[in-house]
Amino acid sequence: MSDVVTATWSAQADELTHTTSRALLFLLGNTTYGLSVDYVERVIEVPAVVPVPRASDWLLGLAVYESTPLPLIDPRYFLLPAQKLSEAPAPSLAGRAIVVSCAHGRLLLAVDQLVTISDLSGRQPIATDRPEFPDQYIEFACKADETIVGVVSVPGLLKAAATHPTQQDQQSGELH
Amino acid sequence: MSTADRNRHWFVAGILLLSCALAVLAVSAWYSLQLRAHQGRVTGLALTLTRIASHTAELAADQAAKEPANANPKSVFQGDQLAQLIATGDIQAAAIENTSASLSVNRVTKEYPQVVSHWQQVRREFGKLNRQAIEPAVKGDASLNEIESVQQSFELLFDAIINESLSRPLLKSASSLRGDISSLRYVIENNTSMASVQSLVDQLQRSTVELKSIATPDSGPALLGYTTAMQLGDFLTMVERLQVFAPAAALSVGSDTGSLSEVSSAALSYIQNALRFVDTELHRSRRNLLVALSLACLGILLITALTWFSRKTASTSQVKSRQTLDVLVDDISRIANGNLGQRSKLVQVDQANQPIAELVDYTTSMVDGLVSVSRGVAHKTTELASMQQAAIEDMAARAEVSVEHNAAQLDELSAALTALQQSVERSASPSATGQHNAAEIQTELDASVTGAASSLAGLSAQLDMGVGRIERALHVSDALVSVIGKMENTSQQSNLQALNASIKQAGYYDNDDDTESFIQNSQRVSRQLQTECNTAIQQAQEVRADLEACAASLRECLSLLEQSARHSLQSTQSLKKLQLPATNGTAAAVAEQVINLRAIAQALGNTNKSIGADESLLLLKGHALELQLMAAKLDESMLRFELSELPADEQ
């Protein structure tokens, strides 16, 4: 097995830094997601992207941010169900990206549209079985301004990205 | 700073000053109470000394009166002096002065051990003086025990005086005098020559006790006075009684009284010295206290002033930051509402927080850029609207005139053909007149057709010019869309900056309502601006679509007019072909020509219909109305970005 991205993940390390209840709301398709601002370094326009050969679908490429090449990840690959993912248009490389910073480093999340920053403290989690809110990637769902928001679990998302097989693995039949 | 903030600051400062004043008053009241208590104790001490001195003086004087031979002039003088000193109130006045002048009760209380030590020192000095004074007596007949007992009695007396200053005066005074009596009794007891006196005293005490036990208020004022004197330790009364019952003992007491007067004078001087020392200490302590109080007041005032100044400074800084943010939000709001002419100058940006300062800087530059871009949009929109208006009015007017002129010429041609047909039918022969008429009609027909052709050519040229103007308007419309796109991009960048400021602010300051409000306002204004830009772009695109439709219609109209011109040319050529047979032919030939002419007239009519001049005119008018409507919409949209009077430095 080659070119498999491996990492030792400590969700606890990220959870310890999770202190505020404000979340950056963004749109993927017509679905609103939230990301704790503890993980958000800033929001930018997507810089020039260099494609990575034989990379997985979720890895849109490498983009240089502050002289550092960071992976540009398409979160729709993990969050949206397969049917909606196939129907959704390809992510625009001229859109917006969130610079995510966590205990394991930094990366860029490509989003369709940035909405606002909302204070989710005191919001009661609501039970939802929407396929756009998979349990392994969504910490909880709540209502913000009459819109249902799925708060993304960054550790879960990054762990899935780090352990997801590459195209080469898929072609060679090797799975991580 | 607002009036409410200023009033609040003054209110807080007033409360602080009032609290300081109340604290000073409370401390002063407490000091006053303590001073009054101290004054009472010192007064009691002075009264006791006065009474002792008075008793001593009276005792000495009485002794001298009753036993002139054994009188001790020194004792009498010292007793008188002591009484005089005490009676003049020197000690009491000094004590009262000390107590009234002193503000530091704590210091006075602390001085009590010092006073006690002074008393002890007085006592030691007294012992030395006493020993020096009685040394000759020691060498003489007086027994040492007697002298020591006198000293002990004075020690007891001074203990009583010390206790006097610390407890109730009367009881202690009585106790002290009773101690003196006991001391005298001790003296008498240790003197063999006084054995009888002792027995008498014992008897006296027993009698006194007995009398006290049996005495009632009805027993007489004398008995009551005697028992009272016993209770209060009235020394003079007791000595008188002793003199009555024991003259021998009185002699010894008289000599002892002389010693008592001497040592009392010495003790009195020590007391005065001690009181002066206390007075000095109290003055010093008062001065120190006043200095300390002054320093404390100054410190409180300084702290109050510093607190007020720091609050004022902080409040001023906050107000300036708030004003800066308010001015910025107002500017952005005005821009969102389309008013770009009244921009405020942003100042004090450096006093805002760092993320806010970055946002303010960026927003300021964004606003500057937005103003510039919007000004360009407004100019181009105005230019576009004027070009559209001019082109449409010109085209409509010229097209209407040309088509009406063309229709009039065709009507004339039709009337001429009808007249020609009637004339041919009327003559029905190739007469000279008929031929002349035919030739004349042909000429008129030729002129009419030629005029129609030239009119169509002019209309065609004018329409061509209109198409060119519309194409230029399309170009301007493209530029307008581009400029509005830049505005939208600027708005999006502003939204990104606001989000980033909010992210930073969430990391640094959790509950800064002003900053949060400012960021939310920035985001709201950015979104509003974005919406307006989208609407403007949509309207500009609709205008562009209408312009394109108008241009297509004009091109179609132009094509039809060219076709009409070709038909006219063909008609002219046909007329020229007909001219020769018409002049030389027979009636049948003329009739044939008339038929041909009718056919030509009909063809011209058909051509007129085929080019649809009326329909084209209506179509053009419809497009003109649509364009005018869209131009009005665009103008209305751009009015939101209209430029009012700009400052001189921006023009």
Image (cartoon, rainbow, N blue to C red):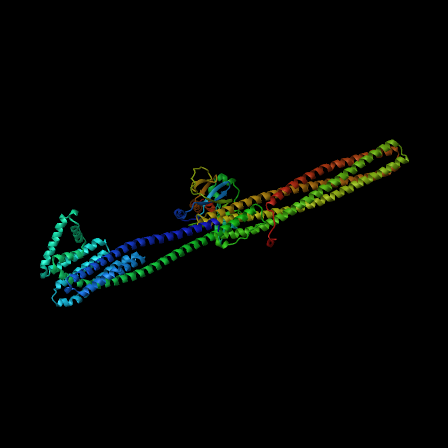
User: Taking B47 as reference, is B534 left or right?
Assistant: right
In the rendered image of this protein, does residue B24 appear above or below residue B146? Answer: above
| Residue B463 in the image, given as x and y percentages of width and height | 72, 43
Q: Nearer the viewer, residue B69 or A25?
A: B69
Q: Which residue is drawn at 9% across and 58% down?
A: B196
What is the total number of numbered labels drawn onto the structure image? 0
User: Taking B173 as reference, is B387 left or right?
Assistant: right
| Residue B88 in the image, given as x and y percentages of width and height | 26, 60
Quadrant housing residue B80: bottom left
| Residue B23 in the image, given as x and y percentages of width and height | 36, 52
Quadrant housing residue B156: bottom left
Q: Which of B134 and B500 is in front in this view?
A: B134
Q: Which of B52 and B530 is in front in this view?
A: B52
Furthest residue to the right?
Answer: B432
In the rendered image, is residue B150 in sight?
no
In the rendered image of this protein, does residue B82 appear above or below residue A78? Answer: below
| Residue B146 in the image, given as x and y percentages of width and height | 13, 62
In the rendered image of this protein, does residue B448 appear above or below residue B227? Answer: above
User: Taking A72 as reference, is B438 left or right?
Assistant: right
In the rendered image of this protein, does residue B192 appear above or below residue B451? Answer: below
In the rendered image, is residue B99 in sight?
yes
